[in-house]
Image (cartoon, coloured by chain):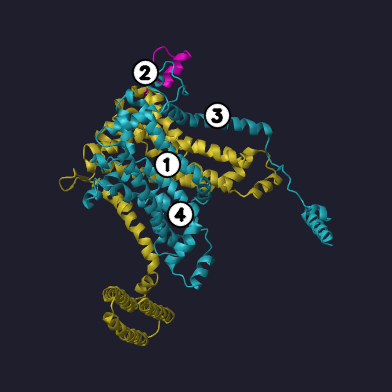
Chain colours: A cyan, B yellow
Amino acid sequence: MAKERDLNAIKAKRIDSRPFSEISDFKVLRKSKKKKRINRSLGGDIALFVLLCLAGITSILPLVLTVCNAFKPLDEIFLYPPRFFVKNPTLDNFADLVNALGSSLVPFSRYFFNTILVTILGTFGHIIIASMCAYPLAKYHVPGGKILFGMVVLSMMFPSSVTAIPHYIIFNYLGMINTQLSIILPAFTYSLGLFLMKQFMEQIPMSLIEAAKVDGAGEFRIYVTIVMPLVKPAWVTLLILLFQSLWGTSGEQYIYSEDLKMVSYALSQIATAGAARTGTLAAVSLIMILVPIVVFIISQSQVMETMASSGMK
Amino acid sequence: MADEIKNKEVVAEIEEVEEEQVDEEEVVEEQADEEQTSEVETSNEEQTSEVETSNEVPEVQVNADGSAEMAVKENWFAAKIRKFKKWKTETGIKIDHWSRKKPLRRKLYLNRTLYLMMLPYMVGFTLFTILPVLISLYLSFTSFNMLQFPKFVGFNNYLTLFLDDEIFITAIKNTLVIAVICGPFGYLLSFVFAWLINELPDKLRIIMTLVFYAPSLSGNAITVWALIFSSDIYGYANAFLIKWGFLNTPITWLTNAKYILPIVIIVQLWMSLGVNFLSLIAGLKGVDKTLYEAGAVDGIKNRWQELWFITLPSLKPQLMFSAVIQIANALGVGSITTSLCGFPSVAYAGHTIVNHLTDYGSLRYEMGYASAIATLLFLASIGLNKLIQRIIRKIGD
């Protein structure tokens, strides 16, 4: 009896485990793998792809060269004829970076610390402040909001050097010359960030916010618990944009003391030191390039999602 | 002990709830008589005072216990909190009462959270963007050296710029050459590459996006170009040209006035596929696919027609955004010249308006003169933007 029951159970299982298409009379429609592409010819596709690849290679070559140079020993950098790729990779340049610059006025790690500090503070401050401002602008009729947003868009149109001199005067007045605040504070009000954030927030359905209001949430609570999680792609994008621009700033106009200066400044100093430092220069450049690229690779899909709503009318 | 604290918390909560209730009532009866509401408020205050008196009794009892000190401390803290909450409620009511006197004030009060949320950015934006533009407009009519008070000189700065300053004319010329080549050409490049990348399968698309976007991501990589265009035979450009027999002796790329501008343009183009490029890729991805099918039915025969009749018109917003970024980039070229050719570059061959501005602003401290340059740059970029936007609006109309 027991055996029979077991057998039945197994049979039942077997029946159940059969794919649906075998049990049912209806056949499941499969999506055809080949998408029909309209208005495309194979020849054109190949030609354009080759063109794209060629352009891509020229675009990436200088960066590859930087990477190669960072690992080249000194005699390989000054080789005639110059070789593009590295033959005997060493870490000498990085060691040199630590040794040679460790004995200078300020240890090299100090520059890195400053850059990281400014980047992190500036980036997160900007994300918080810009998103807090973008929420009312995107979802409510703020009196004067259109004018403010228009000015933000206008401020995206001119190069940042227009405001360099007044910035200096303002910081001088506020007593913030020679402090890192002079780099961090303007970063808070980066206009491209507010623009992207506002455009992205407009997609949030108003009904969601109203539902939260009915449940008794205040505006700030709605912003923290509902809006912010929904606009994650946007703040990841702001993160990468701000990160990229702050990571490369040298701030030499506002900062005089050596122990507050940043890597970008150190880079320009090494560059003026001449040919002997070429390897070290490449090593620093590699580190400076690598970090934003890695951040971008991680956040790539979110950035693209935000950019889809970046359009202007 | 703990119970008491809890009690107080509960009391505080009750107070809060009452406050909220009052608030809600007030919101509902926005246009009700003032007397009525003041009655509500007074009754509320009475209630809270009653609660307080009933609460002070156990405090004394605890003091008699063995663990008196701790109790006193905690009670003191709790009392502070309660006092603060009471103060908060009272001032809240006062402000609320005050806000009712004028409708505008009332609106501000009711939306106070939103306004407070906007405040930090507004303050920062005013301080670091609006104010600087106004300051530089004002200073452009003065002579100012950071030490003495700015002296009004009328249009002198502008007159000197255009009539007496030959270097500025060179700077304008260089900037225009760079902008005219890098602006439209960079714009075209970012569009063409975005369009081609859009046809690729997903994974390849991500890789290609990175490949093109990487140069502008890594702003510090300009130093590589100094190595490529190095003036001795070890430079890559020289070695390549000599090896293939185009040259006999190496060219001093970065110190020869003939080559500086083209090199700056090449590097600028290399870096011009930035945010605008990403925006275009994302925009292309979002174009409605059914439009292409409909277009095919309507007689669109190849990808070029598709591009002109469907893709471009539906990409207009992104094109606009992209143009804004591109113009600001093209007019703001300056750091490339400085880091490649030094400052000032040989015979001012790579001298741009931005270079001229930093020269007078940060080196000579002639702030008035530099502000005049900044104002001109500002006006030029705004004017150019408006012009380009007008042109882009016409696409597909």
Q: Nearer the viewer, mark 1 or mark 2?
A: 2
Q: CA distance from mark 3 to mark 1?
A: 26 Å
Please give the residue where the numbered disc 1 appears in the rendered image: B327
Residue at 51 percent across and 35 percent down: it is B211
- Inspect the magenta stretch and tell me whether residue B249 lies in it: yes
Relative image position of residue A232 (x, y in whole percent): 49, 54
Relative image position of residue A78 (x, y in whole percent): 39, 19
Q: Answer few, some or many: residues within 10 Å of disc 4's Cα (few below 14, many 20 plus, some between 14 and 19).
A: many
Please give the residue where the numbered disc 3 appears in the rendered image: A54
Q: Amino acid at mark 3?
A: Leu
Q: In this orientation, which residue lies closer to the viewer: B232 or B193?
A: B232
Q: Amino acid at mark 2?
A: Asp
Q: Which residues are magenta?
A: B234-253
Check if mark 3's residue and mark 1's residue have beta carbons within 8 Å: no
Q: Nearer the viewer, mark 1 or mark 4?
A: 4
The N terminus of chain B lies in which quarter of the figure? bottom left
Check if mark 1's residue and mark 4's residue have beta carbons within 8 Å: no
Q: CA distance from mark 1 to mark 4?
A: 22 Å
Check if mark 4's residue and mark 3's residue have beta carbons within 8 Å: no
Output the chain of dot 1. Answer: B
In the rendering, which numbered label is found on residue B232?
A: 2
User: Which SS class for mark 2?
Assistant: loop
Q: Nearer the viewer, mark 3 or mark 1?
A: 3
Output the chain of dot 2. Answer: B
* Mark 2 on the same chain as mark 4: no
Q: In this orientation, which residue lies closer to the viewer: B38 or B151?
A: B38
* Mark 4 on the same chain as mark 3: yes
User: Which SS class for mark 3?
Assistant: helix
